[in-house]
Image (cartoon, rainbow, N blue to C red):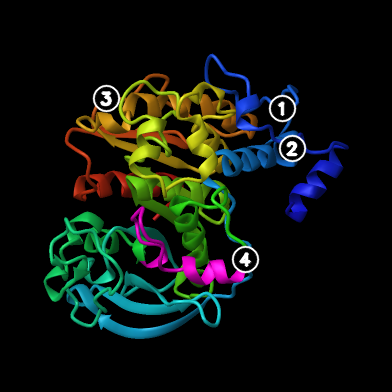
Amino acid sequence: MPLFLALSWICLGAEPVPLQKTADLPSFSGYPEALVCMDGSRVESQLAWRAKRRGELIRLIQHYEYGDQPVTRVNPVAMPIYENKVALGGKAWLREFAVRLAPGAPALHLLLILPAQADKPVPVFLGISFTGNQSITADPGVLVATCWQYPKYPGVEANKATEASRGTAAGVWNPELIIDAGYGLAIFQANQADPDRADERGGLQPWLRSQEEYLPEKWGCVSLWAWTMSRMVDVLEREKSVDAKRLIGVGHSRLGKTAYLAGALDERFTLVIPHQAGCGGTAPARGTVGESVKRINTSFPHWFNSRFKEFNERVAALPFDQHALAALIAPRPVLFSNALEDQWANPDGQFNMLQAADPVYKLLGVEGLAARTKPSLNQLSAGRLGYWERPGKHEMNRTDWKAFLEYTRKHLGS
């Protein structure tokens, strides 16, 4: 058990409640309350939340869904491999790093784009991407990713990125819009950490498994990707041009699930934007709209740990629901963003998750959910538990980023 959790339990004079086998868990008729502990006691104070219940929720989500993250000691070293001080027509300073977590670990490539004229450290969006860094900008100096690629994206042939992929995701990540707003963008590709395929593990996985014992109940891809996002925070904290007190974690779809988990487990993320994160992310596991736990575990068995599959037929026995992660992010701001046509991600159910997390924000003395009912289309809610929905489909685009930036300015300043 981590030292801070052990000290918390000692502080309250209690031992951690043992985690039950999945078959022994009772069913819940609704969403398990975030402020009710495993022993049945109710959290009535901020001390009890920090010292007891928060640690319980971390244990629960890792044990039954995402898996424990690696415990291998790392000290990331970022070596600059390319720099352009007049990127984006002179607006931006761009640098790409080769990041090694430890000697012998494979390199990960982190792209950092900051306003060229910034005279003080800049708040940064840390994103995890489906495509390589070369797709974010057409800059010819950025390396073309060599890891496995999704075949559906432009400029990919035989699961390999080509020169034709340069700049093809600029409309997804909108670096120029971010720079014009006074923020920076740091980004890396998820497939470098672990390729998103059920039949083969790669990236960091072979190296990590040579360092520590791996069992199926340990991390799935989502947990490992989230752990890698935190390792990129390690790098950004050392960059003098980055305001490490204002780091925003962002991802879309399965990578929105990743950003959500990273923000729940790593309090260095000042604000979290899990965009269209759906089942296994921001939508309720108990939801009856869109993707189900059984469907996601069947289609993507590598995303979560082996225990999560035990809830395929009895999801009501899950001793938490996805609002637990929003509760763990509290009192920091988190924005659930959606699209009307993307019912697979259950936008209405996501708003229910914000409602279920709201008592934790109130306990911690801040405004959580400002809107009591789901806001109208294109209306951004005001509280730290933010919600926004636009017309359209499952994608991340310029309209989304305008909402992200408005929400971030509201809560973190410019």
Mark 2 lies on residue: 52
The residue indicated by pointer 4 is 212
Residue 209 covered by magenta stretch:
yes
Q: Which segment did they paint magenta?
A: 192-212
Which residue occupies 61% across, 42% down?
63
Q: Badge 3 is on which residue?
A: 376
- Tell me the residue at 32%/40% (across/down): 276
Relative image position of residue 92 (x, y in whole percent): 27, 73
Residue in the image at 60% along x and 23% along y: 33
According to the image, label 1 marks what residue? 43
* Residue 285, image quadrant: top left
Q: Position of residue 52 (x, y in %)?
A: 74, 37
Q: Earlier in the sequence, mark 3 or mark 1?
A: 1
Dot placed on the residue nearer the N-terminal end, 4 or 2: 2
Mark 1 Cα-neighbour bin, 10 Å: few <14, some 14–19, many ≥20: some
> What is the C-alpha distance between the residues marked 2 and 3?
37 Å
- Please tell me which residue lies in front, 118 or 233: 233
- Looking at the rendered structure, the kind of residue marked 1 is Val
Comparing marks 2 and 3, which lies closer to the viewer? 2
Residue at 52 percent across and 29 percent down: it is 321
Name the kind of residue labelled 4 in the image. Glu
Mark 3 burial class by Cα count in 10 Å: few <14, some 14-19, many 20+: few
Furthest residue in direction front, as rendered: 199
**Which element is circle 1 on?**
loop
Residue mark closest to the camera, 3 vs 4:
4
